Image (cartoon, rainbow, N blue to C red):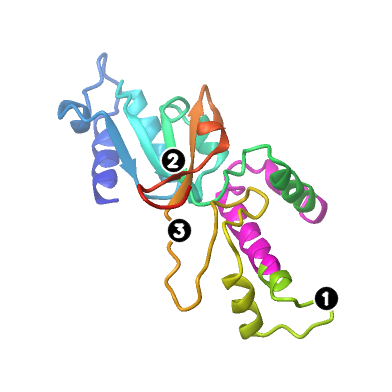
Amino acid sequence: PRDAETLLANARRHAPARPTAPRVPAEQQHVGAVFIGDSGSVIANVGKDCNAQGYDPVYLTEGEGFTLSEAAAPGLDKKNWAEYENVPFFDNIPAIDKMNSTVDKYFPGIRKNKTVWSQIAVEGWASGLLLQTAMEHSGMTAHSKPSTTAIVKGLDSLKNDTLDGMAPPLAFKAGQYHPVNCWFTGHVENGKPKVANHGGVTCEKGTGS
């Protein structure tokens, strides 16, 4: 974040009208890719300012806060890559379609707000699906009284469950730490976000699938 702030400050300081805009420090150092760990609005401003000076790196961003406003921002509309803990919200799998239909029913219009609707929505939805799946696997019914013990029992019974494609394969073992070492990848092409690897997940070597 500090490097991103420095880059942004330099870009803005040198942006005034001149026939030939100076190159930003990152380009002078032959930096071909930039990671910006900040909000979507900050990321969009960095891309816009760098683009105005002719600096066109590959942008690596956090998928969690990704919004369509980033995809449309100059500089980010062609070379923006991000990792996602859950399937990207712009995918068109049935599970995403179901989420969108439900959101449109109870919160009409919110998905049209390009600065508000983000990947965080998918994370919340997937968390609800995980809790629902755990309760179902525990043997609870709609009339059962939920309990921590029952929910944990349900989670421990999951074996590579993807929550209908919303998550990487999830498996839990009682009494053990449960890292999730797999992720989805998305990128922006001509201003439109797309899911890479045909929607498949990438995992650290020796883990996941």
In the image, residue 184 sits, relative to residue 176, either above or below, namely above
Residue type at the position of mark 2: Ala
Q: Which residues are magenta?
A: 105-133
In the image, residue 97 sits, relative to residue 150, either above or below, namely above
Asked if one can make out residue 61 in the rendered structure from this viewpoint, the answer is yes
**Mark positioned earlier in the residue sequence (3 or 1):** 1
Mark 1, residue position: 142
Q: How busy is the neighbourhood of tag 1: few (under 14 within 10 Å), some, or many (20 plus)? A: few
Horizontal relation, residue 21 to residue 161: left or right: left
**Mark positioned earlier in the residue sequence (2 or 3):** 2
161 part of magenta stretch:
no
Residue most extreme to the left: 29
Residue 85 coordinates in the image, percent (x, y): 50, 52
Q: CA distance from mark 2 to mark 3?
A: 17 Å
Question: Residue placed at 73% from the left, 43% from the top?
Answer: 94
Question: Residue placed at 45% from the left, 25% from the top?
Answer: 78
Contact, mark 2 vs mark 3 (Cβ under 8 Å): no
Residue 34, numbered label:
none
Foreground of the two, 130 or 39:
130
Residue type at the position of mark 1: Ala
Mark 3 element type? loop
Q: How busy is the neighbourhood of tag 2: few (under 14 within 10 Å), some, or many (20 plus)? A: many
Dominant SS type (magenta) = helix
Residue type at the position of mark 3: Val
Mark 3, residue position: 180
Mark 2, residue position: 82
**Mark positioned earlier in the residue sequence (1 or 2):** 2
